[in-house]
Amino acid sequence: MENRIDIKSLNLEELTQLFEDMGEKGFRAKQVYQWLHVKQEDSFDEMTNLSKALREKLKERCFITSLVQEQVQISKQDGTRKYLFCLEDGNVIESVLMRYKHGNSVCISSQVGCRMGCRFCASTLDGLVRNLRPSEMLDQIYKIGKDIGERISNVVVMGTGEPLDNYDNLVKFIQLLTNEDGLNISQRNLTVSTCGIVPRILQLAECRFSITLALSLHASSQKKRLELMPVANKYDIREVVDACKTYFEKTGRRVTFEYSLVGNVNDTKEDAEELCHLIQGMNCHVNLIPVNPIKERDYVQSNAQRIEAFKEMLEKNRITVTVRREMGRDIDGACGQLRRRYMNSHEK
Ligand code: SAH
C-alpha cells in the first residue's frame, strides 16, 4: 500500500504547507507546482531548479501520479481519439479527445466503473471499482495534451463514473484544473455531467464555480425515468429539476439537460410534450443524444423522423435544443465500451 503523498493532487496551499512542514521555503512549492501542472513533469529528477537533496527528500515523501497510455484508437472520420490509460494499481480507464473547430475537448472518467446502474450504459455493468483521485482525473488531460502536442481548451467530465459520487475529489480537480498557476483552463470551458444526485448538486451550486452542469434527464416523467435510471428511486424527477433551477440561481450558469433518445421508450410526441412542460420557463439547453446501443441490452436508437419531430416540438416551445453529433462512430462508441472490450479480452 502506497503511503507516500500523491503530490499532484495537492493544491498550492497544501503544497506550500508540505514544504513548510519539511522545513523548506514556501516559494519552492510554486516551483514544484509549475513543474507538475504547467510543464507536466513526472520525475522529481527533472526538476532542475531544486537541489538534489530536496529532490531526494520529495521522493521519500511523495509520488507523482502518471497514467500510462495502454491503447489509442483514432477515428478516420473525424480525428476523435479514444484512449485507454493504465493506473498504478493495474486498473484501466478511458478518455476521449474530440477535435472541434473551436478547439480540443477532452472527456474524462471520474471513477473506475460506476454504481449508478443506468440501464443503457456500459460503464456501470460491473459496478464501481474505486474513485479516481484528483491527480488521476487531471493526468488524463495532461497526457492527451502531450500526445497531440496541442492545447486542450475544453474539458467534460462525462466519461465513466458519476462525478458527484466522488464529490470531494471532483471539487479538488476543478480547483487544480482551473488554477491560474496550473493549466489554467477557464471554468466556463468545463462541464460536469451528473445523473442527478440532488444534495450534491445543491452543494456544488454553493461553490459558485462558473462551470456548466449537465443533467442526465433521459425521461420526462418520474415513471419513465425510473425504468431507465435507478437513481430516480432516490430523487424524484421534480426534485432534480428544482435542484437545476437552484443551480442556475446560484451560479448564473444555464443548465444543459441531456436526453438520450431510446427508440419507442422515451421518444414519442407525448414524451416531448411532457418534457416541454417539465422544463418550461427555465434558462436551459437540451442536448438530444441518439442512444448508442450496447450489446448487453436491447435498446435501439430512435429513427431520424422521431429525432427531428422531438427536436421540433421543443423548438416550438422555444426551448433551445441541439442533437449531439456522433463523433468517433467507427471506434468503440458508447461510454465504457472500449474499456469493457479490453477487460474482456484480458480476462484469464
Ligand atoms: N454519470 C454521469 C456522467 C457519465 S455518463 C451522468 O450520468 O451524467 C455521460 C452521459 O452519457 C450521460 O448523459 C449518460 O446518461 C450518457 N450515456 C451513457 N451511456 C449511453 C449510451 N449507451 N447512449 C447514449 N448516452 C449514454
Image (cartoon, helix red, strand yellow):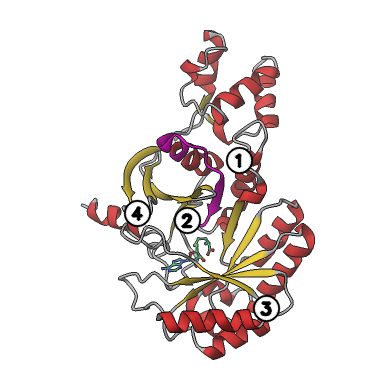
Q: Between tags 2 and 3, which lies in front?
A: 3
Amino acid type of the residue that numbered disc 4 sits on in the rendered structure: Arg
Question: Which mark is drawn over residue 177?
Answer: 1
Q: Is mark 2 within 8 Å of ligand 1?
A: yes
Quadrant containing the N terminus is: top left
Marks 4 and 3, the one that precedes in the sequence = 3
Up the image or down, 326 lies above or below 263; here it is above
Q: What element carries label 1?
A: helix
Question: Which mark is drawn over residue 318?
Answer: 3
In the picture of the structure, the residue carrying the numbered disc 4 is 339
Amino acid type of the residue that numbered disc 1 sits on in the rendered structure: Leu
Q: What element carries label 2?
A: loop
Question: Residue drawn 47% across and 26% down?
Answer: 42
- Indicate whether residue 233 is drawn in magenta: no
Marks 4 and 2, the one that precedes in the sequence = 2
Q: Between tags 4 and 3, which lies in front?
A: 3
Question: Residue drawn 34% across and 56% down?
Answer: 77
Residue 107 in view, yes or no: no
